[in-house]
Image (cartoon, coloured by chain):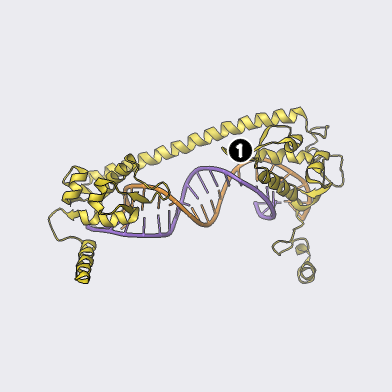
Chain colours: A yellow, B orange, C purple
Amino acid sequence: MCIQLQFLLPFPFFIIWVDKGVVKRGGFNKICSLSPQLQEFVGEPEMARTEVVKRIWAYIREKDLQDPKNRRNIRCDESLHSLFRVNSINMFQMNKVLSKHIWPLSREDEPVKQKKKGEESDHSVSEGDVNNVAQEEEEVEEEEEEEEEKVSKQKESKKRRAAKVDKEVKKRGGGGFTKLCSLSPELQKFMGVPELARTEVVKKLWSYIRENNLQDPNNKREIICDESLRALFDVDSINMFQMNKALSKHILPLNGEAPDNASRKDKQSEQEHEEGSL
DNA sequence: CAGCAATGTCTAGAACTGGC
DNA sequence: GCCAGTTCTAGACATTGCTG
């Protein structure tokens, strides 16, 4: 396939293999020399960076070395400890430390990063590196905390915006959804008021469901009906979407007009059901 | 489309590397 | 700036039902 492509494609495409599953020859897939520790780990003296990462992750999964609380953190067993010199390492830090073990083939005695920056003279992973990693991990943790704070603030502001919108809608006297409706005797008993907007009914219903822990733990869309809900829906359990449908039977127009289309449909189906049973 | 809910899927972005 | 490789997470979005 590659050979055919070489004939068909102009020069720049020589080095790019199009087929899936075929290793490309880009900078990442360049074969590099590995440090003695890494050689011992992967069992080969030379390997592409991407392949090294793949092997390490396969090992991590095989030995179940990911921290269950934060799966980006890798718990180092003996083999990994000999590589990284720490008890645990962040998955991103791992790549950084790994670079000290991957050297260009042309100058085997020089780590990739050092060749580039010329910062250090010692090729092995020093204690200084370990300290740097630990310090960087602390910084990462702080950043993560800041990020969490940001997210929670965003959520709060979102809630506030939603509340503001809600208030404005109420101020306006309610549109189609916030229009007050008359409730059936069963729903009146449940809500404690004779009239309520559909959205409010749904809201109160859900707060009741949560309060009484009535969601099926296996499928939280499924509501387990207690006595009060059974009086409303006449079933032992109901899907949260079906609940809305069933609810419409209990929500009637305020002026005492005939029930809506859906209710009419329900009545029709009830009629059909009765006729069928006859 | 507004509101209400839970869940699933998808996507982007996060770190890091060197060559082109 | 893109390419490969890794995992996790947040956010967006669709779904489903109802009505004006």
Answer whether residue A4 is visible to the viewer in this image.
yes
Q: Which residue is mark 1?
A: A67
How far across and down, in percent of the image, does residue A191 sit? Answer: 21, 44
Residue nearest the observer in this picture, A181 or A122: A181
User: Looking at the image, which residue is at 71% across and 65% down?
Assistant: A19
Residue nearest the observer in this picture, A231 or A59: A231
How far across and down, in percent of the image, does residue A251 sit? Answer: 20, 53
Q: Furthest-left residue in view?
A: A256
Residue nearest the observer in this picture, A190 or A13: A190
Q: Furthest-front residue in view?
A: A278
Residue nearest the observer in this picture, C17 or A139: C17
Answer whether residue A102 is visible to the viewer in this image.
no
User: Looking at the image, which residue is at 20% across and 61% down?
Assistant: A260
Please determine whether, in this image, residue A237 is positioned above or below residue A147: below
The quadrant of the rendering that contains the C terminus of chain A is bottom left
Q: Is residue B3 left or right of residue A124?
A: left
Q: Is residue A32 left or right of residue A55?
A: right
Element at badge 1?
loop
Q: Is residue A155 left or right of residue A65?
A: left
